[in-house]
Amino acid sequence: MKIFVFLFAIFVFSTQSSFAGAVFVEPPQTPIGAPINVHIDIDLKPGSKLRMPKTLSLPEGVDFLSYEALPPVTHEDGSKTVRVVYKVEAYKIGKSEIPPFEYIVIDSTGTESTIKVGPTPFEIVSIRNDPATADTPKDIHGPAKASLRWSAYIYTALALIAVIIAGVLLWRWLAGRKRTPVEPPAIPEKASHELAYEQLARLQAEDPFGKGFAQEHFFRVSEIARGYVEKRYGILALERTTLELEREFDNRYAPQNIKMKLLNILKACDLVKFAKRKPTREEADNAIQEALEFVDNTKRMEKEKVA
């Protein structure tokens, strides 16, 4: 009896193993907000069928985008390899993973086998630290071919060397004399509110919303507001989620009404960026106006503190 149970367990394990899929994430390191492809390759015996989940259970900060089953590859023995691609995107920097999930394989006899795969790790990096673009070289042309007659340039080269030597000697003589150093005028850095005004004006002029790019419009409003808070208050707002920024941007920095105005701007932008909400033209214009009013209010506070 024990031998029968043992052989049955081996049979079940080998059956499930034969259907187990290879899961991998492409790319394993992805900039924040960029699509992530979760691939799973499954080998099916002749006559077998596959039943995959059409969506995935994902952790906080990861959104499901799409499901796609690619055409299977048929082998000489009649077996098939099926590739399924889940597309997701994440907005929380750091290491994360796709949780384990299950799919069902139905063999030629109608027997169903439930297969569990995962978890599958991946990492989200900041746009500033994107390894795919940080060291991308620029295109250059090949060296130009030229035929030079050195004898035609020898006298010019000697004269140039003599001028260089004379210039070095003159510079050393002038450097040895006592002179009052003159410091160049300092280039004033733009104030945080001036930079924010310029960026919002540029966004209004380019009008990505009017060209059909609603997500880009609200993404830029959010980035301008976060960049202003980072430069104005010294908070790493560009690296924070809205929830994290809500906890950190407390009454030490601004009154409650100012804080709520900032959060309303960011949450309105998040609804379009993450929840794929379809905004109106009026909402797009209001987002810029709210950002301008937020800068106006905090800029006035900045002047009052200096006074």
Image: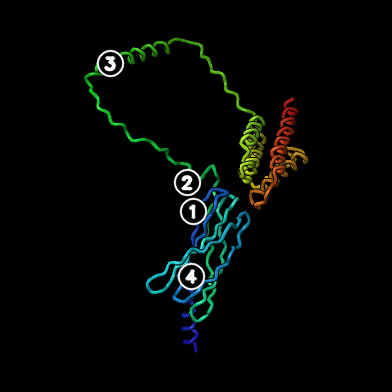
What residue is pinned by disc 4?
20
CB under 8 Å between discs 1 and 4: no
Count up the numbered dots.
4
Of helix, strand and loop, which one carries label 2?
A: loop
* Chain-order first, disc 1 or disc 2: 1
Residue placed most toward the observer, 167 or 176: 167
Quadrant containing the C terminus in the rendered view: top right
| Whether label 3 touches label 2, CB < 8 Å | no
Which residue is nearer to you in this view: 121 or 111? 111
Residue 127, position as x, y percentages in the image: 54, 44
Whether tag 1 and tag 2 are in contact, CB under 8 A, the answer is: yes
Label 3 Cα neighbours within 10 Å, binned few <14 / some 14-19 / many ≥20: few
The numbered mark, 3 or 1, whose residue comes first in the sequence reads 1
Dot 3 corresponds to which residue? 156
Q: Is residue 255 above or below residue 46?
A: above
Residue 88, image quadrant = bottom right
Distance from disc 3 to disc 2, alpha carbons, whole Å, reads 48 Å
Left or right of 145 in this view: 192: right
Residue 27 is tagged as 1
Image position of 29 with respect to 189: above or below: below
How far separated are the C-alphas under marks 1 and 4?
Answer: 22 Å
Q: Between marks 4 and 3, how big is the CA–CA gap?
A: 76 Å
